[in-house]
Image (tube, coloured by chain):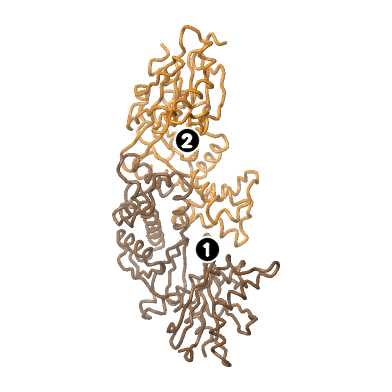
Chain colours: A orange, B brown
Amino acid sequence: MQNSARLIALDWGTSSLRAYLLGEAGAVLDKRQLPWGIMNLPEIAAGDRSYGFEQAFKEACGDWLAAAGSTPLPVIAAGMVGSAQGWREAAYLEVPLPVAGIGQGLATIATRSGATLHIVPGLLQRAGLPNVMRGEETQVVGALAGMSARDADDVLIGLPGTHSKWVRVQQNRIAHFDTFMTGEVYAALSAHTILGRTMQRGAPFNAESFARGAGVALSSAGINGPLSTIFSSRTLGLTGELDGAAQADYLSGLLIGHEIAALRASRAQQGLAPNPRIVLIGDESLCARYRQALELQGLDNAVIAAQATERGLWKIAQQAGLLT
Amino acid sequence: MQNSARLIALDWGTSSLRAYLLGEAGAVLDKRQLPWGIMNLPEIAAGDRSYGFEQAFKEACGDWLAAAGSTPLPVIAAGMVGSAQGWREAAYLEVPLPVAGIGQGLATIATRSGATLHIVPGLLQRAGLPNVMRGEETQVVGALAGMSARDADDVLIGLPGTHSKWVRVQQNRIAHFDTFMTGEVYAALSAHTILGRTMQRGAPFNAESFARGAGVALSSAGINGPLSTIFSSRTLGLTGELDGAAQADYLSGLLIGHEIAALRASRAQQGLAPNPRIVLIGDESLCARYRQALELQGLDNAVIAAQATERGLWKIAQQAGLLT
């Protein structure tokens, strides 16, 4: 099996490192997950941070490199490993840009193993309020690789998470993207405000409470925006209308509903189609929540993409000429 | 001076207890502040929470009561002391209601000192998403007491703080109120999200950064709402456009700007006048920030009220017949 290995692909983020051994056409031959995110490196020697990266790199793929023998396998990585706090900064590319342009901006590191590590750059958008992403650009490329040329020609790609990204792709270009801090705001509200005090944790997901929260942005009260409507997670509890066990999913729905309502308002402001083709990438249960909230607002054209990261790394390596 | 004492008025919240000795026409004869908020009572004996309240009450006004001699002074309190976690729950009154109706709903406690403590009820609004306040209703009454009948007939009262309240008073009725968790959200974002990491604290207030943030809600990017625009506090730092020392005031302005934009949108939705008479109540520097943000959005008819709590307690005591 090792014989057909073509690429080592690393998804190297803040808190974890995922490694993929890819074969012909990007087929996953092997994969592993290590805890060595860039903020959690092994054995950092004082004054030599690169040592921690080297160690993590060796654990992630040292054996794969050795098994490849005399024909060195190319290695590519995406994520925070390319940030200013990473191993080497891969300078942001500016949006808008052609999707195929991402593979033209790789930074490189000559590792102690002898292998060259190629790092995918993040994206920066200066128009309006500035926006950045690092890692998601690779998932976007991966999702597009799995679509027909026609479908990929005009699509909105959603990457829900701590910082949700919504990326508009048109005519093979990354035209625009937005960030919503929905996941991190949810966590901060739940753990560090009065809203958390009446929440009972650990209940199984309650789709009804989630839908109730997701509907708030559409109600007449929704016009006040999330700074105001979030208080209802508490007051509906005070008036006996919302159990403590239902409040977490209600608040989650409420925030995601506001996010999607804002997205719709923004599209309307720009004269874009109200019900675009949507591809969601990320944690399966979170994507399911987003799809539920999207449908509630009439956005019923969403699918969930799988394996976007490894597919994206493969595609970018191809764009960069690493697979010739 | 004690001879002319007419009322003891307590502003008894979660974290502190303010006591006022009021004379003719509500003139403040003496005042003091104690740390005995309802979540911070002195010497709570196991199983007897009321003991802590009794001790705090005695320290707050025992000497004033004793000095009054044989004609007992009436005592009134507002704030969280009347909540379910307080000394005695003063059941919420429902909005809309006549302003003068607040004095009809006082709860009473026969204290060990012999004096009766009267507690002002909070307000509950069930229309739309439920809303509650406790303590602010008294400040609203106090602010109205300082206005001409004509001015008080149609006014929007803003109480910025941890949970900002906006109270619409029309024809001597509390018609409607909204809550924005702006202060608490700001604190949670600053202390518990990635936005805090690049903020440098302790810089003096920077009105320019505040105004820049407050303008975001009015910009085309503002349509994405605060879940999205808050990220710019970080990204403007990454692109070198916003110093770490300016980020706290920028974020504060951004959130307050969204709050006021939402208030305006909501008024427009309801067909209310776009530039109402506004009275602000609260911390002086925070009220100044709100006035700045209001003016930026064309709401240039705002004044700041002083002594609203003690005036409100006096007025409600009068309404309740405690001063006859």
Q: Position of residue A252 (x, y in %)?
A: 54, 47
The 10 Å Cα crowd at callout 2, few under 14, some 14 to 19, many 20 or more, is: many
Q: Which residue shows up at 47% across the image and 31% down it?
A: A38
Residue nearer the viewer, A243 or A194: A194
- Examine the rendered structure and indicate whether residue A243 appears above or below residue A318: below
Vertical side of B99 occupied by B178: above or below: above
Q: Is residue B129 above or below residue A110?
A: below
Rendered image: mark on residue B90: none
Residue at 54% across, 88% down:
B67
Which dot marks residue A159?
A: 2
Q: What's the distance in space between the residues labelled 2 and 1, CA to CA? A: 34 Å
Q: Which is nearer the eye, B101 or A30? A: A30
- Classify mark 1: helix, strand or loop: strand
Residue A318 placement (x, y as % from top left): 41, 17
Residue A139 coordinates in the image, percent (x, y): 46, 28
The N terminus of chain A: image quadrant: top right
**Residues at marks 2 and 1, common chain?**
no
Which residue shows up at 35% across the image and 24% down it?
A105
Q: Which residue is mark 1?
A: B131
Q: Secondary structure at mark 2?
A: strand
Q: Amino acid at mark 1?
A: Asn
Residue A265 position within the rendered picture, expressed as x and y whole percent measured from the top left: 40, 46
Amino acid type shown at disc 2: Leu
Does residue A295 appear to the left or right of B236 in the view shown? Answer: right
Left or right of A151 in this view: A128? left
Q: Residue furthest front?
A: A46
Pointer 1 chain:
B
Q: Give the quarter of the figure containing the C terminus of chain A.
A: top left
